[in-house]
Image (spheres, helix red, strand yellow):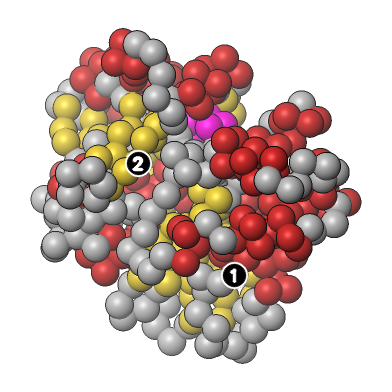
Amino acid sequence: MSAKVDAGSAGIAPGVDPLYIGLMSGTSLDGVDAVLAQFPEKHDSGAIRVLASSHLDFDADFRNELLEFNHPGTNETHRNALAANAIARLYSAAIEQLLDGIAPSVRHAVAAVGAHGQTVRHRPGEFDGCGYTVQLLNGALLAELSGLNVVCDLRSRDVAAGGQGAPLVPAFHQAVFHRPGRDTQVVNIGGISNISLLGDTVKGFDCGPGNCLMDLWIQRHLGQAFDAGGQWAAQGQVLPALLEAMWATPFFHQAPPRSTGRDLFNAAWLDGLLHDGHAQAAPVDVQATLAELTARAIGTSVPAQGGGIDAVLLVCGGGAFNTHLLQRLQALLPLRKVLSTDTQGLPAMEVEAAAFAWLAQRFMAGLSGNLPSVTGAKGPRVLGALYPA
């Protein structure tokens, strides 16, 4: 487990507006991202100041344990409960790293922590008409360890209201990145990719795999956690027959609202396709094909209309650092500028954690955090459950 904290945070002092901490550990399973954010009291404003950020890596054994939870296994209840405790301890450590060296008065100004938890199953609408989504986190333990109000279980209420429970970030993207008269779309490329189509009516949905399959493949063949800059994928050739076999997966042709996860896009899915006529494919060509699949899933999700200097696709998440992937997106979307959210003042690796700080703010104010136009829920809902300090 390693930590990174932005420099220059020691001089932070609380202001008039309350502070919120956002914690995110996503489907990339790389670790915990944390931000200390300040929002204005005017809750409908998209203004945000990220005052500090930190990152804690998952160690390899814990990451592998979490991966196993995407499939049925033995003694799951016991293992899930202990993993939820471990996530709470990691989240608490991320908070301590975030606030290290910051004045104690700042901690007292933190109104709440918005804690996502670790998604291990996501099956909304299935089985009994409601389905479920599972994010591992012992919120009570995190409140005990941190001494802060904890808002967590942020997806379940939307699922209970008939929604997908995902993606939740389009509401935040609209608040922060939308500009009247500018054609702006936002894609978050984590383990899974999701798109936010901004405007008078916000749309958003999961596109499909982001980094999860590329990470899996390079770890298997080169022992690396991820394909830095997409350099390995750039050396390969896209395999058209394999790409089309992947693209035949029904999810890609399902109308929104839709969401997905490692329940679908996992090693078994990929290995099944490879064994069905592609077993002799060179590993580097499979990596190139997986990168092209991610680019196609995103590119076909962006409206074809639009152009000119005001048409942009903003990219956040770990995929924003995959140069090869961004080049493929730019080639597929020639009428748009493909840019990192860094260009808009919010670093790509801080966006999701900031979104969950924003959702905590919404909860504490009694305001809805979902968009029915995105998730398909019956209406706006206040999202989350509170574990008081």
Q: As drawn, is 50 to the left or to the right of 132?
A: right
The residue singled out by tag 2 in the image is: 122
Residue 159's place in the image compared with 370, above or below, is: above
The mark closer to the camera, 1 or 2, is: 2
Q: CA distance from mark 1 to mark 2?
A: 24 Å
Q: Quadrant of residue 271?
A: top right
Within-10-Å neighbours for mark 2: few <14, some 14–19, many 20+:
many
Q: As drawn, is 60 to the left or to the right of 82?
A: right
* 33 part of magenta stretch: yes
* 256 part of magenta stretch: no
* Residue found at x 24% / y 63%: 376
x and y percentages locating residue 11 in the rendered image: 47, 35
Residue 236's place in the image compared with 151, above or below, is: below
345 or 272, which is in the foreground?
272
Q: Main secondary structure of the magenta part?
A: strand
x and y percentages locating residue 288 in the rendered image: 77, 53
